[in-house]
């Protein structure tokens, strides 16, 4: 896949949503005040990308994205039937108080695998509290090579860059 080869190996995006139909529509909506906040983005990316300028959006499109629905339970627990998706971002638009993100899926991932505390460490996720990174809608950027994280976590079926 061409998208895989051109992806950043330094950062990835985590987009968590409560949109039930996110994977059937290929569009995720994030409330603007939960998108790319200082708390959820490395400073160098925040400075360049958080205002969603044309250049900032172009840079964000180079980062792979994991799009998840909110966990079904608290404390790092979710249904074994819940899947998230490794994706690439196609388009980003501000629409009122929301940000709409169109994406194309690359590979499904059982979300429970990200909730595992050991695996969560590889992905830079906090699973050590009641309300984890996968319990509330937000758009964040993690300074993690997501492809290495998939390898370290032993999650199969993910296309890897050459």
Image (cartoon, helix red, strand yellow):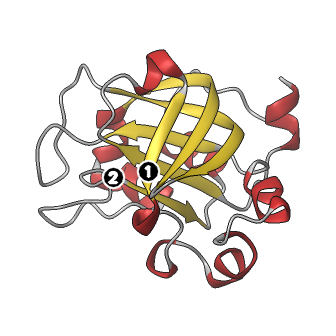
Q: What label sits on residue 155 in the rendered view?
A: none
Q: Nearer the viewer, residue 146 or 118?
A: 146
Q: Position of residue 72 (x, y in %)?
A: 16, 37
Q: Nearer the viewer, residue 112 or 119?
A: 112
- 117 left or right, relative to 106: left
Residue 65 sits in which quadrant?
A: top right
Name the residue: 49% across, 20% down.
25
SS at badge 2: loop
Q: Nearer the viewer, mark 2 or mark 1?
A: 1
Residue underneath mark 2: 137
Name the residue: 47% across, 48% down.
15
Location of the C terminus by quadrant is: top right
Q: Position of residue 157 (x, y in %)?
A: 58, 21
Q: Is residue 118 above or below residue 77?
A: below
Q: Residues within 10 Å of mark 1 (few under 14, many from 20)?
A: many
Question: Outermost residue, front direction?
Answer: 96
């Amino acid at each position: 896949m061409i998208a895989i080869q051109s992806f950043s190996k330094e950062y990835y995006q985590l987009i968590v949503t409560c949109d039930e139909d996110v994977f059937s529509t290929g569009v995720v909506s994030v409330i603007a005040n939960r998108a790319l906040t200082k708390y959820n983005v490395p400073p160098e990316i925040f400075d360049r990308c958080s205002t969603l300028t044309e250049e900032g959006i172009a840079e964000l499109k180079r980062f792979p994205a994991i799009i998840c629905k909110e966990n079904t339970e608290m404390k790092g627990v979710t249904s074994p039937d819940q899947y998230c998706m490794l994706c690439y971002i196609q388009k980003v638009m501000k629409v009122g108080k929301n940000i709409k993100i169109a994406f194309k899926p690359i590979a499904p991932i059982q979300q429970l695998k990200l909730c595992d505390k050991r695996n969560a460490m590889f992905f830079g996720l906090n699973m050590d509290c009641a309300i984890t990174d996968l319990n509330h809608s937000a758009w964040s950027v993690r300074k993690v090579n997501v492809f290495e994280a998939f390898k370290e976590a032993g999650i199969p079926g993910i296309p890897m860059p050459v």
